[in-house]
């Protein structure tokens, strides 16, 4: 199955087999559609040769390349690893998220390091109500994750980020009572709200997403999520995710006057990501909060630059968004995602003056740009 949308003389395709989004010229979209309908290469060349100036030889090469793309099997991660669940777990913590209690058992300090720092502010010593039991354990090659004695998945240690993503996804499912099929996707972004709607900040690592989020939450906005932003399929709302805001060393000078607690807060060195971070507690006191999305903002802090805000193409935004996101492989969700995303205003914001950045974000929320 292939989904198709047209925008700005380009065609966006979603390929169900590989859960892949492509932005192509109309002729490529037509070839893909014909191939998908089992039309032969010779018939396609005949049908298209009269419509454009492309030579038959070039058409033949294009069709061959597209055929390879469509027939290449998706790479499925093998999942036949086995990690024996230990009888003794060295660490355990209870985390309270609204009325949800999650009891996480860590086999060693290593597993605890992968999860606990960004959820430490949720830890509670007096759990009450229904409790879900998470277990995280590993050997010298693999890491496993189970919930209520059911193994969720096992990964190679070199793919430990996939475990962290799945762990966060299960947190989202439990706290919002929605299974994975009920989400459009999860974006590598930061999200804020003004109580009426939400806004997403995107960009490459180091561009200032989390720092901007910390500045905005200190100036009247609410932190919805940092680094892991879930979007629901039914209402297309941005939902809260309760992790702390991660702050890199080079942002400390800017944020210490606002968050003096950073001075003595714990520092964590994530060697795989080559970054050292500290954490700020989000100011969200209602993790059930979910709001419609006002805009997507690709944000970048650039020293000594003046404030610059401009609208960008949704095609451009899609190309930047997709590689760093988990998007639902369900056809109904892919269709909803395309229709939703292509209507959202997208901006590029570059700044060095924090006050001007905050004022500009306020203007976007208030439709004052």
Image (tube, helix red, strand yellow):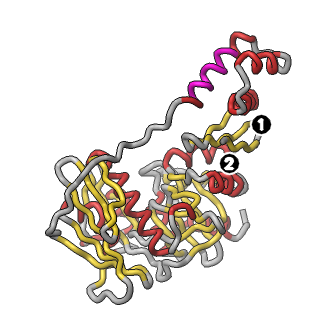
Answer whether residue 67 is magenta in the image: yes
Where residue 129 sits in the image (x, y, percent)?
38, 88
- Kindly state the secondary structure of the residue where label 1 is placed: loop
Of residues 291 and 129, the one nearer the viewer is 129
- Quarter-of-image position of residue 90: bottom left
Q: Is 53 located above or below residue 5 in the figure?
A: above
Q: For the point 62% across and 40% down, which residue is it? A: 15
SS state under label 2:
helix
Up/down of 68 relative to 272, above or below: above
**Vertical order, 123 against 77 (above or below):** below
The quarter holding residue 355 reads: bottom right
* Furthest residue in direction right, as rendered: 50
Magenta stretch, main secondary structure, is helix
Q: In which quarter of the image is the C terminus?
A: bottom right
Q: Where is residue 156 in the image (x, y as percent from the top left)?
A: 28, 47
Q: Name the residue under label 1.
A: 9
Q: Give the range drawn in magenta.
A: 60-69
């Amino acid at each position: 199955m292939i989904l198709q949308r047209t925008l700005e003389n380009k065609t966006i395709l979603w390929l169900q087999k590989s859960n892949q989004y492509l932005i192509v010229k109309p002729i490529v979209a037509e070839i893909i559609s014909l191939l998908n309908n089992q039309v032969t290469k010779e018939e396609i060349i005949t049908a298209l040769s009269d419509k454009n100036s492309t030579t038959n030889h070039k058409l033949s090469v294009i069709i061959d390349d597209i055929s390879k793309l469509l027939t290449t099997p998706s790479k499925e991660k093998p999942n036949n690893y086995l990690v024996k669940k230990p009888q003794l777990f060295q660490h355990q913590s209870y985390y309270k998220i609204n009325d949800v209690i999650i009891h996480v058992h860590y086999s060693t300090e290593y597993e605890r390091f992968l999860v606990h720092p960004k959820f430490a502010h949720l830890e509670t010593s007096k759990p009450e109500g229904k409790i879900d039991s998470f277990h995280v354990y590993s050997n010298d090659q693999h890491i496993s994750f189970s919930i209520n004695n059911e193994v969720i998945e096992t990964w190679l240690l070199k793919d430990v980020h996939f475990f962290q993503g799945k762990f966060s996804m299960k947190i989202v499912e439990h706290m919002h009572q929605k299974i994975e099929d009920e989400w459009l996707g999860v974006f590598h972004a930061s999200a804020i709200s003004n109580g009426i709607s939400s806004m997403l900040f995107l960009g490459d690592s180091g561009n200032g997403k989390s720092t901007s989020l910390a500045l905005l939450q200190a100036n009247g906005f609410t932190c919805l999520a940092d680094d892991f932003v879930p979007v629901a399929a039914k209402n297309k709302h941005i939902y809260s995710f309760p992790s702390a805001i991660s702050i890199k060393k080079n942002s400390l000078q800017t944020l210490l006057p606002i968050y003096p607690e950073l001075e003595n807060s714990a520092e964590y060195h994530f060697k795989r990501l080559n970054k050292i971070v500290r954490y700020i507690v989000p100011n969200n006191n209602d993790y059930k909060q979910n709001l419609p999305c006002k805009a997507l903002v690709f944000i970048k802090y650039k020293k000594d630059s003046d404030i610059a805000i401009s609208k960008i193409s949704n095609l451009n935004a899609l190309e930047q968004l997709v590689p760093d996101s988990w998007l639902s492989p369900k056809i109904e969700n892919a269709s909803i995602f395309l229709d939703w995303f292509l209507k959202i205003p997208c901006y590029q914001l570059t700044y060095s003056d924090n006050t001007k950045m905050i004022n500009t974000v306020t203007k976007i929320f208030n439709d004052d740009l």
